[in-house]
Image (tube, rainbow, N blue to C red):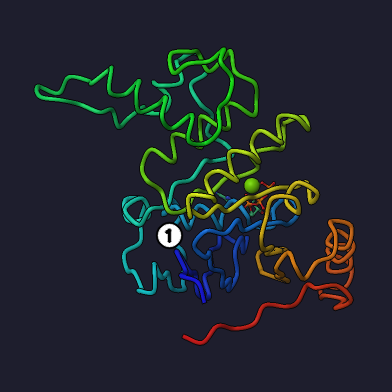
Amino acid sequence: MSERIIELRHVTKSFGSVNAVENVSLHVERGEVLGLIGDNGAGKSTLIKILAGVHKPDSGEIWVKGRQVTGWNAAKSRDSGIETVFQDRALAVNQSIVRNIFMGRELTGPFGLIRVRKQLEEADRLMREIGFTSKVFNPKSLVATLSGGERQGVAIARALYNQADLIVLDEPTTALSLMETQKVFTFIQNVRAQGRSIVFIGHNIYHVYDIADRFVILDRGTVVAEARKAEVPSAESLIADMQSIARTGHVANEVGLHTPVETPA
Ligand SMILES: Nc1ncnc2c1ncn2[C@@H]1O[C@H](COP(=O)(O)OP(=O)(O)OP(=O)(O)O)[C@@H](O)[C@H]1O
Ligand SMILES: [Mg+2]
């Protein structure tokens, strides 16, 4: 079995009377793209905010690379190699690519001076690593001049800068055209090729089906189904099963989806 970068066990999080996440067990394996799907309000963003240490779960356990972690918070999440590109936190579009990548964690030399040249080199390297091919852009280009897909690329480069083992992307392709979505997919595939993991949240099941190796479906705060891509014949069958889940509350079992199996502690 491949290594689990992170694992949530029976995690619950409520906001007042809203059970945003309820008894969720979920893990991410090294080198996989995990697609997290579910309707508006299903708890996807809340779940990844728990992974990021932004929200403290009310109950449940968090395990990192086989060890239980206590006092989970944003610093521990980052130290554990988890970087999140949040749905609701945009880049500074009137700043350069390099400024965005290093914002808040600049490379500094003696006397605290920012190592501008080093940052430019590093930004250039990161952009190439994830697959920026355009000759029009360089690290000094303003983010405002980039397309939507390329902006996601900058956010991914920013996440990669920290040598992340896991990059979490909350709806990175929602506002993008087909071509731009393909760019983001290329970035993701390059990240996975380095043996890193991705959690990809999306509304568009076709997008998620294309890019993910494994799917987890959330419905009103709980994991209702999961499957490996090899078990699901097509995006259409994934959609059909999700509709049946929404209607009946459980999996129809005709396709590869199955209700989650408890992992032994
Ligand atoms: N900070 C918060 N305070 C109060 N309620 C919240 C908070 N964050 C989320 N919720 C509620 O928790 C539930 C799950 O929200 P969440 O944002 O996790 O859903 P989501 O699956 O990401 O939805 P979407 O697809 O619309 O982004 C919703 O009912 C939401 O209103
Ligand atoms: Mg969300």
Front position in the image: 257 or 126: 126
Residue 231: where, in percent of width, then height? 77, 71
Residue at image x 9%, y 22%?
A: 111
Ligand 1 within 8 angstroms of badge 1 C-beta: no
Front position in the image: 7 or 232: 232
Is disc 1 placed on a helix, strand or loop?
loop
Q: Quadrant of residue 215?
A: bottom right
Q: Is residue 181 above or below residue 55?
A: above
What is the number of callouts on the image? 1
Number of other residues with Cα within 10 Å of mark 1, as a class: few under 14, some 14 to 19, many 20 or more? some
Residue at image x 53%, y 64%?
A: 28
Residue 90: where, in percent of width, then height? 54, 29
Position of 151 compared to 245: left or right?
Answer: left
Front position in the image: 185 or 193: 193
Q: Is residue 98 above or below residue 104?
A: above
Front position in the image: 10 or 257: 257
Residue 88: where, in percent of width, then height? 57, 36
Q: Is residue 192 above or below residue 252?
A: above
Position of 219 compared to 161: left or right?
Answer: right
Amino acid type at circle 1 is Lys
Residue 223: where, in percent of width, then height? 67, 69
Residue that numbered label 1 is attached to: 56
